[in-house]
Image: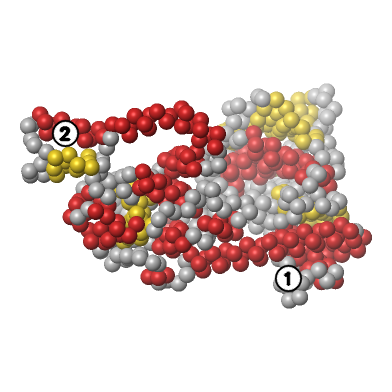
Amino acid sequence: MATRKKQEYNNESITSLKGADRVRKRPGVIFGSDGLEGCEHSVFEILSNSIDEAREGYGDRIKITKFDNGSIEIEDFGRGIPVDFNKSENRYNWELVFCEMYAGGKYNTNNAESYEYSLGLNGLGLCATQYSSEYMDVEIYREGKKFTLHFEHGENIGGLKSEETLRKQTGTKIKWKPDIEVFTDILIPTKYFEDVLKRQAIVNSGLLFIYKDSKGEKEFFYKNGIEDYVKEIAGDSAISSVKCYSSERTGKDRADKPEYKVKLSCAFAFSNRVKLMEYYHNSSWLEHGGSPERAAKQAFVSQIDAFLKNSKKYNKNESKITFSDVEDCLIFVSSSFSTQTSYENQTKKSITNKFIYEAMVDFLKHNLEIYFIENPIEGEKVADQILINKRSREKAEKTRLNLKKTLLGSVDVVNRVQKFVDCRSKDLSLRELYIVEGDSALGACKQSRDANFQAIIPVRGKILNCLKSDYDKIFKNDIIRDIIKVLGCGVEVKSKLSKDLSMFDMESLKWNKIIICTDADVDGFQIRTLILTMLYRLTPTLIQKGFVYIAQSPLFEIETKNKTYFAYNEQEKIEIVDKLDVDKVKYALNRSKGLGENEPDMMWLTTMCPDTRRLIKITPEAAEKTASMFDIMLGDDLQGRKDFISEFGADYISQADIS
């Protein structure tokens, strides 16, 4: 095979990206991703500029239109972007704004020159979005003129054009199509626009957002901002009134750094049915929190803990509450603004300002202290609910730990499982666990197995019906506990009331195959179904990932002078017998014995030898169908069982007659 000559690494190997290529070849650096999420963030960059204008007092509405071809249009009614010649920069402003990275009008926010509290900071968003577009058309209305610009693939076509206009309303309208050559996906779903516009309406009180697409038009507006939003979320589930507080602070992130201003506001209520924690800064939703989130956790725990101590609500030697106990019943929304902001990156999903954290901790502690003093009855209800959350959490955690100890125990726990027979190999890709029916089958399988990789655990009697039993009863059942111990992976508890009991760990599974092996009779089928139902309820991932099998036992043995044939169903029996009749071979037809009655050689050949056995892999669909049928036959729906027997009973009677 020819080898490719490597290019020499020398002084000419170092290059720099220029112009639009700085974004088009590395969109993830600016937008956080070259996928749909990055494309969505490019929309937010344009929207941010319009919101900043409105926050400065210019424009009371913003229009957003999504077109079916993936293009987007955003129109505001602000002052309109300055486009004329800039003497200090010796360039036209439209070139700086649309074609120059790190150019903009929001670098002096701390000196209150303009855009004191702005979403945009770096002078990157508008230019980067233009660079990453297939095309962009711009209309700017200011000074009695209409200015237009057209861009294609990051390049301006035709320069700046202007004409007189009778329109008195100033503003900026930008229509563009994200470039599929830059992003892997540009078809932004309607839900993204609705979510973003609702959030922006919440934190920009009194600003109307109008969204339009081919399906119609929607408006997003919150007159009282976050207070109205918390009331909407709380509905009639609140156990307290909605409180809203605001404050302004001035401070520094470090002694040698300049001072900056911070505006803080929050709204909250307590509920025993819904919970919500949302943080915004300079209108941007802080999806990953940062300073405000850390401040809220610190302040709420501190003040509520103090109230519980002062009210003597803690039991003697009771542990302190945690934030999760508070969060379980808290609806909290904070919206802060600052003249200087340290975002984690350009996507603005988290802030790191030290002073904002300190100011918000003090702000929240102060107002929570006043809240509990001025609202003693509400405070009692809130404190009681948080203690209920705490004690429920601790009880669930204790139950989970006890369950883990019971089911998993120490490393060598399987050696203490009654009648479990392990295999020698430690190679997880080889190890097989046979779950067999009764002690007699255990003896037969033990003699016929390959002890290197096949282990056996017997089921003593009929296992518990896991569809009808609650978790407490299930985990007291010896058979189920032993099987879970031997599996080694714990259990998945999918219940709102008992989610803390879940301790499933796929990495701890000790087997490559889990094989259910029962007699081919009515009792065997029922035991097999009970085991399968147990696995379906307690460890469904094992089924989903294809670890669970059923070993088919033959129904018939057809013996000739030189060979024994096995038929696993009625059709196979007929085919074998017909062939022997045609060949005029004498044979004896017998029903197969139970597993415990088989000779070791026969057991190995029919059930355990990887080359000759028949295994059925259980799929999630098959397990669900089995559980559903099991519920019909053994569940609480008596009428459902009667209806099933009435409709299908004759089929089973006729099959019994044949065999």
Q: Which residue is at the far right?
A: 374
Q: Residues within 10 Å of mark 1 (few under 14, many from 20)?
A: some
Q: Is residue 46 left or right of residue 261?
A: left
Q: Position of residue 76 (x, y in %)?
A: 77, 34
State which quadrant residue 130 falls in: top right
Q: Position of residue 496 (x, y in %)?
A: 62, 51
- Depth check: give the residue in front, 550 or 385: 550
Q: Is residue 508 left or right of residue 27?
A: left
Residue 577, disc? 2
Q: Amino acid at mark 1?
A: Lys
Q: Amino acid at mark 2?
A: Val
Q: Earlier in the sequence, mark 1 or mark 2?
A: 1
- Depth check: give the residue in front, 113 or 290: 290
Do we see residue 41 in this rendering? yes
Do we see residue 429 in this rendering? no
Residue pointed to by mark 1: 320
Q: Which residue is at the far bottom?
A: 317
State which quadrant residue 364 falls in: bottom right
Q: Is residue 301 above or below residue 228?
A: below
Mark 1 vs mark 2, CA separation in Å: 76 Å
- Depth check: give the residue in front, 603 or 300: 603
Q: Is residue 556 above or below residue 334?
A: above
- Depth check: give the residue in front, 537 or 513: 537
Q: Position of residue 128 (x, y in %)?
A: 62, 43
Do the CB atoms of the residues marked 1 and 2 lie less than 8 Å apart? no
Q: Secondary structure at mark 2?
A: helix
Q: Secondary structure at mark 1?
A: loop
Residue shown at 83% from the left, 47% from the top = 227
State which quadrant residue 340 falls in: bottom right
